[in-house]
Amino acid sequence: MAETAPLKVAVAGATGYTGAELLRLLLVHPKVRLTAVMASERSAGVPVGRLIPSLRGRLALTVEKVDAERLAAQADCVLLALPYGETHRVVSVLRRHGRRVVDLSSDYRLRNAAEFEAWYKTTHTDPEGLAEAVYGLPELYRKEIAATRLVANPGCYPVGALLAIVPLIKAGLGRPEGIVIDGKSGVTGAGSMSQKPDPMYLYAEQNENILAYSVGKHRHTPEIEQALSGIVGAPVQVTFTPHLIPANRGIFTTAYVPLARPASTADCLQVYREAYAGEPFVRVLDEGELPRTRAVVGSNLCDVTVVVDERNGRAICLSTLDNLGKGGAANAIQNLNIMHGWDERTGLDAPPVYP
Amino acid sequence: MAETAPLKVAVAGATGYTGAELLRLLLVHPKVRLTAVMASERSAGVPVGRLIPSLRGRLALTVEKVDAERLAAQADCVLLALPYGETHRVVSVLRRHGRRVVDLSSDYRLRNAAEFEAWYKTTHTDPEGLAEAVYGLPELYRKEIAATRLVANPGCYPVGALLAIVPLIKAGLGRPEGIVIDGKSGVTGAGSMSQKPDPMYLYAEQNENILAYSVGKHRHTPEIEQALSGIVGAPVQVTFTPHLIPANRGIFTTAYVPLARPASTADCLQVYREAYAGEPFVRVLDEGELPRTRAVVGSNLCDVTVVVDERNGRAICLSTLDNLGKGGAANAIQNLNIMHGWDERTGLDAPPVYP
Amino acid sequence: MAETAPLKVAVAGATGYTGAELLRLLLVHPKVRLTAVMASERSAGVPVGRLIPSLRGRLALTVEKVDAERLAAQADCVLLALPYGETHRVVSVLRRHGRRVVDLSSDYRLRNAAEFEAWYKTTHTDPEGLAEAVYGLPELYRKEIAATRLVANPGCYPVGALLAIVPLIKAGLGRPEGIVIDGKSGVTGAGSMSQKPDPMYLYAEQNENILAYSVGKHRHTPEIEQALSGIVGAPVQVTFTPHLIPANRGIFTTAYVPLARPASTADCLQVYREAYAGEPFVRVLDEGELPRTRAVVGSNLCDVTVVVDERNGRAICLSTLDNLGKGGAANAIQNLNIMHGWDERTGLDAPPVYP
Amino acid sequence: MAETAPLKVAVAGATGYTGAELLRLLLVHPKVRLTAVMASERSAGVPVGRLIPSLRGRLALTVEKVDAERLAAQADCVLLALPYGETHRVVSVLRRHGRRVVDLSSDYRLRNAAEFEAWYKTTHTDPEGLAEAVYGLPELYRKEIAATRLVANPGCYPVGALLAIVPLIKAGLGRPEGIVIDGKSGVTGAGSMSQKPDPMYLYAEQNENILAYSVGKHRHTPEIEQALSGIVGAPVQVTFTPHLIPANRGIFTTAYVPLARPASTADCLQVYREAYAGEPFVRVLDEGELPRTRAVVGSNLCDVTVVVDERNGRAICLSTLDNLGKGGAANAIQNLNIMHGWDERTGLDAPPVYP
């Protein structure tokens, strides 16, 4: 029986932590072969194993300067972890060549160009791509992901928030008005990149520190609202506050959702268990258990639970994920698997790294 | 002019982190002299500088077993950082002897014995003490603290929550219904003590981990509600969720308060500036600045600010403090200063330790 | 062609971090099937996924109380991560049944029972096992490991020290007199276990702290000396000092070896490159590069390099490894692979987790 | 009796962590008044409390651009925490005006200009200043410090190394040949500054990481050698390796010194106790105790001890300090106190911050 040739995959944006995580995962993916690694001009010409010392000896490629035409020539499928601006240009070239793309930037997540422009303060130059793009949260849009060539991998906070909230809203147990989402993220999730140092991300600044940022205006807010609005069939608005926590990886989401009617914790958990039955990467905890980021770091898992505050008629929805895992690179691999008709767990079966 | 003799002060409960912080602060307080240090039987007989290596060479006292009569004999004023149970018994003896007491346990914080018993699942054995005790948050109850002999030092979370919320409620800008309080605490604030190891607090469990605990039922909830109810003049209920963050010290509070009427961030900040004018330990940040625990750790300071989420008619009230500082030992010293008619800043003027 | 049935493997000592890491690795090992997980009585009856939340949903086994006969009945090969005392008894039963064993305790590492008793202050009750056991450092004893049924997996510090020093000694470039080894370990390497809390390992004690322990008398010292003495053919003694560093995983070894004759850094590195040519898990860095634990954590890799201090005629030999990886569980899997004639990389090909 | 007017003190180099620590300490020093705070052009015009949020509300000064003439006009005594290059120029102006100076840079530490130039690869432009400068380690050069106007505050590693080693060498118990010094430092000690981000110092790079740097060539080496050579009366060379540890503050020094003759741990400790009798900031531990950085962080203390490795005839000398404390800013204040004839403890009596 003939073996299928591996899929040729390229990664652009390898100098950030998301790019490094993509490489780590793709190196043990049994159905793909890495054919090109691209990044900004500064890193071009450097062997991958020197740029990312953990990969030393594992990948005989040298970093190339980002070049959309060359990406299209080298790969069947491209994973993009580029900053805003470069992404548009690259995607439109890849689309022209018919390549499959998983974009980990924020450029194709909002379907409405006007909303994109309101939150990102810039015009969108690829409206056709926007029309084709599917929001890459498999637990909500699995079928659409399987059918598209352009997946917009979600932001790390929205993955945690949506997986924590959506079952309650879909079941009509949670009211879509008055939702408050409080996110706590490790430092790699908040934009810090090894090649773009910002004083805010220095060790001595983040260590032993807790802070909030982008209060009332974080750009992941409209992503969350877009998905919830789609489910409810009417505009939904949420208050979302992100925080930075002294840890490398992990997002803990605490979402406060008013209950539409009295319900016990057990009632709500039953809704979650049904909603996520069969999902390979979402674990609903037992009543009495609480999630911790420790239990999912290094994997594509998301642990969720809900506790009802009966005194106040409010559900406290909790989730944990690895911002570079289910909140980033691993979720992108899950999308890649779905786009190619493979078992979603392919290449993603390593358990979390504990402790 | 005759110098006043220093006040004789004793600390009971020296093996926990709160007790150690009390000693650190009292050692440089110009108006007190430490006369006794007590703890559980296990530590009795150990020199303080061996129990707490940071204090080696600074205090020629040996830890004694907790003994209420001896405390009364040795000190004019006693600071108690004991666990529940011992506290009641000790306080009643000290009250009988007319000693001034700042109690850092939770035994005298709730004025209503029934509420205490509902949350703490035990009966209160000192109702007279309860009637006399004043909730030791100087920014709210300064006058009452000056007039009492028994101060119940507040829990660490309530200090952060109340200082963040109260001005908005008092001004009628914030609605007391629908308040959500999300607290993030360093590990020393969550009950970990060097002599009472719990697997949950082991380094490898907490490091690189984010988690919630006591969801929907943390015992600091009724403290917050009691103070808000007193201000509003009607029962107030809040949803409060505490989280554990991998850092030694620091609490970051994010409180979500529905606005009673449209107001800008600037409007709200003006209310805070007026409320805290003259307060020596509360700093209201400028619009555009956000607090970080880093800037208050090691001190009695609390930084507060507010950001209005105009899309949702909600104020996001933020505060930072050191759980062992304004959330614990330093606030207790502030209470001691007030009780003795001294400048509140006495012994508390060292700036935060950064970084 | 008939598929070979997977090897039945059991793990005893699952409540420590080493045991948890064994399970994490074995779950993705393509040639083994986990048939039993044992631990102390306290954990017996608990599903593995509740004891180790990261493994929730991955392993349908329940923890059993350690039972040597049952281990022999359930498994072809047993990995032991038990504390001293239980190990002897279990190994002798397994040996009687002809089972293959990789023992991660320290009971079978020292070949000389008298030396064992001098360092461990207890008598050795299984001298026959001792005679059969092979010290499980594949880079030194690959052939012996392949031929034995009982492998004594090395201590975490000795792996780092020996891989850093041995090539220099073997080549005659390093003098075996006057060697100083300074080890720095993350907290999981120093004996901390989730079920055996010691105040020393509490978060607030280890965080933001650096300390030395067992100075001049750490029990890994004779392991290092035994291996070096075997290579030199004469007794070798070293000074070894372990330190505890606020990180979960990782050991950094700095070994100071007097040079037998003048040699440049390049000369020495050439010796290392030749010594480790073909080794799948040892990476010799290029001149000018320095190791960091970050680049190996989560894997079975050991990065090594050497810098010559020409002013003092001394080689500074550096290595990094993950104490739970090459310094523990992953190295045990490598031994298991060798014992069964498999490619040594089987189940160990996931790159390090960075960052 | 007339009160003495406070000494006018200025700090130049306030944007680094050492500068911030100087301000923190000077703000509670009872005998000085801060009259000017200077830094690079980028920070000029910013209120100190905005540049260093922990000092918000404590200091009504605005950062000025470094200006040597203005420093001389504004202050009686100047503390310099400037990078190389600016320092020479500023010191020569201050010397001309007769101002007292404590320089925390490395420019005046090496007495021999040729040696300075060999290690720093640049010429020294102020040989007269060099001739006047005193190496500011009070425990060795107290009398000289009292008599000079220019003190070169020592490097953080040399303080830890010299306080750990010198008593043994002075007593003739330690041999000056074959000394190995292994230093482990928190991140603020290794040059990271909030305004000069380097990718190496990013949170996600340093967190959960252990590494060595400047192996065999760190510029603190000649400082250590210069002091030891002065004591021995002959050239002394040492091997020194610095390491970076994931913590904000703290240096742990492990120094290996060959013994000149057999001696017990108790013998050696007796030598240390005599050497440091009366020293206000050096604590010699009891036999059996080991130092930890936790016990000195935030203070000017240095804990020292020694353990004899009798098997190898080697003393293992251990010390801990806060790199910003005894290894930097606090030691500079001690020097300032000595230069002005004050009690050395003035302004430095706050105990360490634990935990």
Image (cartoon, coloured by chain):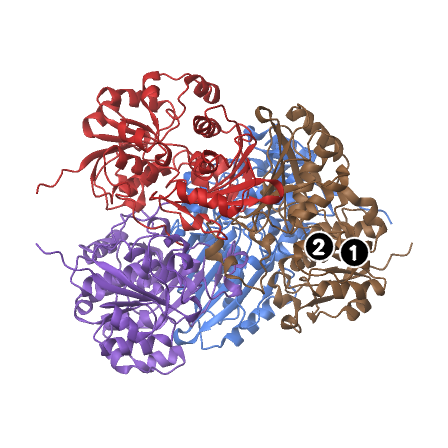
Chain colours: A purple, B blue, C red, D brown
**Residue beneath the point at 24% across and 19% down:** C96
- Measured from the top left, where is residue B275 in percent x and y? 59, 67
Image side of residue B167 versus residue D160, left or right? left
**Which residue is label 2 attached to?**
D116
Residue D15 location, quadrant: bottom right
- The residue type indicated by label 2 comes to Phe
Residue D130 is marked as 1
Image side of residue B87 versus residue A44, left or right? right
Residue C79 location, quadrant: top left
User: Disc 2 is attached to a residue of which chain?
Assistant: D
Front disc: 1 or 2: 2
Q: Nearer the viewer, residue A46 or A89?
A: A46
Query: As displayed, is residue C174 above or below residue D56?
Result: above
- The residue type indicated by label 1 comes to Leu
> Disc 1, disc 2: CB below 8 Å?
yes
User: Disc 1 is attached to a residue of which chain?
Assistant: D
Looking at marks 1 and 2 on the same chain, the residue that comes earlier in the sequence is marked by 2
Q: Quadrant of the C terminus of chain D?
A: top right
Q: Quadrant of the N terminus of chain D?
A: bottom right
Image side of residue C352 versus residue B144, left or right? left
Total labels: the figure holds: 2
Q: Nearer the viewer, residue B47 or C20?
A: C20
For mark 1, does the 10 Å Cα neighbourhood hold few (<14), some (14 to 19), or many (20 or more) residues?
many
- Measured from the top left, where is residue C114 in percent x and y? 44, 16
Q: Is residue B268 visible?
A: yes
Q: Nearer the viewer, residue B6 or D226?
A: D226
